[in-house]
Amino acid sequence: MQDAESYTLRVIKRDWFLNLIERAGPVMKKLAGLRQADRLRDAPQVIEQGCRELLNIDGRMLLAFSAQDLGDLLSLDEGQASGKCFLAAELLAEGGDDAESRLKAVELYLRSAAKGRKAAVAASARFRACLAAVDRAALSDGAAAALDSVPPAV
């Protein structure tokens, strides 16, 4: 009975994560369009909308909170923590163009990896781009440890 419950829970979590990614598509497309048109000054509005719609948080939190505090907030619902941290990192990576946003994105990607999204993080081109742009010495101890567990890009 335990295996059937565990399997059902895994399927529900996977379906929730896939639904979240599908709903995030239009937001990420808007951010990519802003980046391509060199209009990142308009990104905070798109990020705020995405945060409200996808993460159920005020977008200003994404920009104002530290990676640790944001990760703690997004991890309140343990079943959705890895997906929410991953999506917050994607929003920051696509919409942010400063060192602080990239570092925060890497920290959230690695928190997502530590909570079970290692393959998704490893496959993310945004993660790799942010990681290449940050000083690894600036990573928290937890993020540095999680980095060792992320497989190389495929």
Image (cartoon, helix red, strand yellow):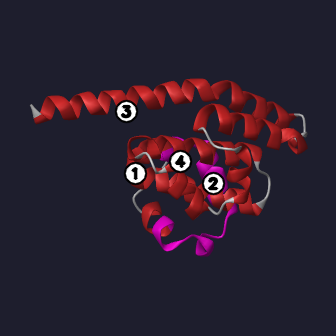
Residue 115 image label: 1
> Who comes first in sequence, dot 2 or dot 4?
4
Residue 85 image label: 4
Q: Residue at x 44, y 28 (%)?
A: 16
Task: Name the amino acid, label 2.
Answer: Ala
The reply to whether callout 3 and callout 4 are in contact (CB within 8 Å) is no
Residue 13 image label: 3
The reply, left or right, for residue 67 in relation to residue 97 is left
Residue 105 image label: 2
Q: Secondary structure at mark 3?
A: helix
> Who comes first in sequence, dot 1 or dot 4?
4
Q: In 3D space, how far apart are the residues under numbered discs 2 and 4 (Cα atoms)?
A: 9 Å
Region rendered in magenta: 121-143
At which x and y percent is residue 6? 21, 35
Task: Name the amino acid, label 3.
Answer: Lys
Task: Name the amino acid, label 1.
Answer: Lys
Q: In 3D space, how far apart are the residues under numbered discs 2 and 1 (Cα atoms)?
A: 15 Å
Q: In 3D space, how far apart are the residues under numbered discs 1 and 3 (Cα atoms)?
A: 12 Å
**Magenta-drawn stretch contains 136:** yes
Is residue 154 something that shows in the picture?
A: no
> Who comes first in sequence, dot 3 or dot 2?
3
